[in-house]
Image (tube, rainbow, N blue to C red):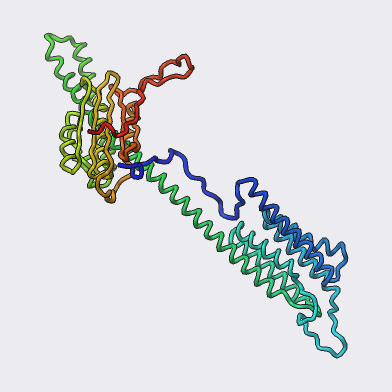
Amino acid sequence: MNAAADGAEPAQGTSAPVPAPGPHISKRRWLRYLVYALVSLAALGLSLSGTDEMMGEYKLGVPQGVLAGFAQGVALVLALRRPVPAWALSLTATAVTALAARAAMDPRPALGQVPYPGTGPGPDWPWSTTEVIVQAAVLLLVALRVPTRRALAALGVTGLTTFVIQGVLGAQSYSSTGTLAVAVCAVAVLVGTTLRGRSEARTQLVEQVTITAEERNRRTLLEERSRIARELHDVVAHHMSVISIQAQVAPHLVENPSEELKENLAGIRQNALEALTELRRVLGVLRSENPEYPEDPYAIGGAGTGAAPDAPQPTLDRLDALMENTRAAGLDVRSDVRGEVLALAPGVELSAYRIIQEALSNALRHAPGSTVAVEVTHAPDGLRLFVTNSRPQQPVPPSPGAGHGLLGMRERAAMLGGHVTAGRTFQGGFAVVAFLPRDGVARPAEPAGPSGAGTSAVPEFIFPTGDDIP
């Protein structure tokens, strides 16, 4: 019985946040600013390099060269937040620059000379080196941030623009870069879509794991509540049957009962029978769903293992038999009952038995060869249960069906106004501590003391250390 098997369950109604696919800059402000600074420096370097290339190779004027060069730098910085507008800006700047540079390239060959467009010598056209780098980087971010079909559409527009400028309009005396630029951009989109696909797959896996865990916990909670409700309905049905019989017999115990008394007793009996019918109907629905856990080879005493549905519900009087079954299964169990045994509500006795039974099953499952101490303390305000096992003395085998024992214990205790605490001891064992009010009703909180803080009437426990195990 360890934390791994019945460890802390996730909080009800909460789930782990699932990140959206795409590039995410760290939430740490200093690291985010560092990324922006590095990209801005790279953009400045590419802008200066592009300006020099526009003015040197394309023979553009200073205003045109500066505008063309810094448009690419701005697109690179913008791509960190808005990659699609950045891609449009980079592609538009490239197209305008290529058309402006084409005017400086004489499209008419010399007399008697056969033209060979794009064979050089001449500048790189229609894509300069800076433009290829920026466009590929922007398309990479586009592929990371938008669906694949939109990234492919952007790549198609880039390729179509390149074809129109170079293949349809053309120019003379230049070194062709269209094919190379489209190929580099295609590789960038391929890398981006691959990374995005991995990110989406990871996100879907996290979502599925989260949903599966939540559904499993919800299903376990509903199953345990159904099982508890069925057992308590059996107890209530027994008392309703007794009321019905007593109401039927009562007129015969009184000499010359009045008609009014007979009518009242008949009404009590009729109401009891109707309530009993409704209880059995609900109980039938619960049993028809068969909300029991799968067969557990480590279960003790038939809890959740398909016991006879009409068998009487167990009480604390059957603890000795439960201890014997546990000892027969291989555990050294030592019990101690303290305090004056007072009458308990039927639901409290049933839940106390089930809590001890589950704790012993978990000890058998997760701490083979250990020594288990079971202490039941009867107090005026309720019932205290301590189940502590020592460190396992044998290798722990795989445990089918583990993981829901503490959930059921806590659900039972909370239903009766009590609580359950469980955790490791300092010596490597495990302890379960429970408190159940005697009548199954939670005690109201006491008025605030001198410090201003109210204290709960539910007693606080000193968590056991395992030293008290004989």
Query: Can residue 281 be spotted in the picture?
Result: no
In the image, is 357 to the left or to the right of 406?
A: left
Image: 384 above or below 307:
above
Measured along the vertical axis of the image, is residue 62 above or below residue 329? Answer: below
Expressed as whole percent of the image width and height from the top left, the position of residue 54 reads: 82, 68
Horizontal and vertical percent position of residue 375 = 24, 29
Quarter holding the C terminus? Answer: top left
Closest to the observer, 446 or 208: 446
90 up-or-down from 232: above or below: below
| Quadrant assignment, res 298 | top left
Return the residue nearer the eye: 244 or 109: 109
Between residue 342 and residue 86, name the one nearer to us: 342
Residue at x 49% of width, y 54% of height: 204
- Residue 378: percent from the left, percent from the top? 24, 22
Left/right of residue 450 with respect to residue 421 in the rendered view: right
Residue at far bottom of view: 112
Find residue 289 and report its image quarter. Answer: top left
Quarter where residue 170 is shown: bottom right
Residue 440 in view here: yes
- Measured from the top left, where is residue 407 in percent x and y? 34, 38
Number of disc labels: 0
Which image quarter holds the N terminus? top left
**In the displayed structure, would residue 115 be above or below residue 23?**
below
For image coordinates 15% across by 14% down, the residue present is 251
Position of 49 with respect to 233 (left or right) is: right
